[in-house]
Image (cartoon, helix red, strand yellow):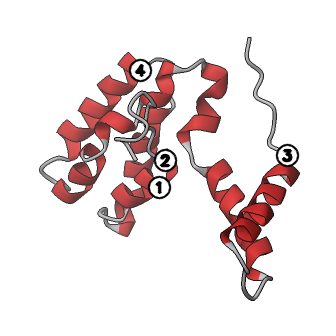
Amino acid sequence: MASLFTATPRQRCVVHKQRNVLNAIPHRERKEVGTELGEIFRQEKKEEALLNLAAFKAKYQKRYPEATRSLCEDEEHLLTFYAFPPVMHRYIRSTNAIESFFSNVRQRTDQIDAFTTGTSCLTIVWAVMQDIHLPKIPVS
């Protein structure tokens, strides 16, 4: 996909990344580590987030190498949302809108036993797209 949309910035879903990182942490410490991990993405500026990210990696690298490896593997795509106005951050950080869209498409297409043509499938998907009402993002 990156080769098709070369000018499009990529953002990994922060919620899914946090879950992946916390899966490598023992249950007894997930609350404390999860709070610190979440603070990385709640900063107002990217520079502050990078400082928190570096502190998190330094603190947990030796103790939980798998967790920090999971966090670092997509590091360049975790903070992309900071390139946009703050009002848009919550919409860009997670994939909720995309997952909701695919859920709506699945609900409609699962009811149909077979599509006669590819066009008939696309017609249903298009109809679902037209019916979705996403919240308007206030951009100033």
Does residue 66 show up? yes
List the residue tagged with mark 2: 13
Residue that appears at 78% across and 62% down:
123
Type of amino acid at the residue the image marks with label 1: His
Q: Position of residue 140 (x, y in %)?
A: 74, 11
Between discs 2 and 4, the one toward the N terminus:
2
Left or right of 131 on screen, residue 44? left
List the residue tagged with mark 4: 46
Q: Nearer the viewer, residue 31 or 129?
A: 129
Q: Secondary structure at mark 4?
A: helix
Q: Position of residue 87 (x, y in %)?
A: 67, 23
Give the answer, above or below, for where 110 lies relative to 93: below
Q: Quadrant of residue 21?
A: bottom left
Left or right of 95 on screen, residue 39? left
Query: Outermost residue toward the bottom?
Result: 113
Task: Check whether the beta carbons of the residues at disc 3 and disc 2 lie within 8 A of each other.
Answer: no
Q: Position of residue 31 (x, y in %)?
A: 45, 55
Residue that appears at 70% across and 72% down:
106
Task: Check whether the beta carbons of the residues at disc 4 and disc 3 lie within 8 A of each other.
Answer: no
List the residue tagged with mark 1: 16
Q: How many marks?
A: 4
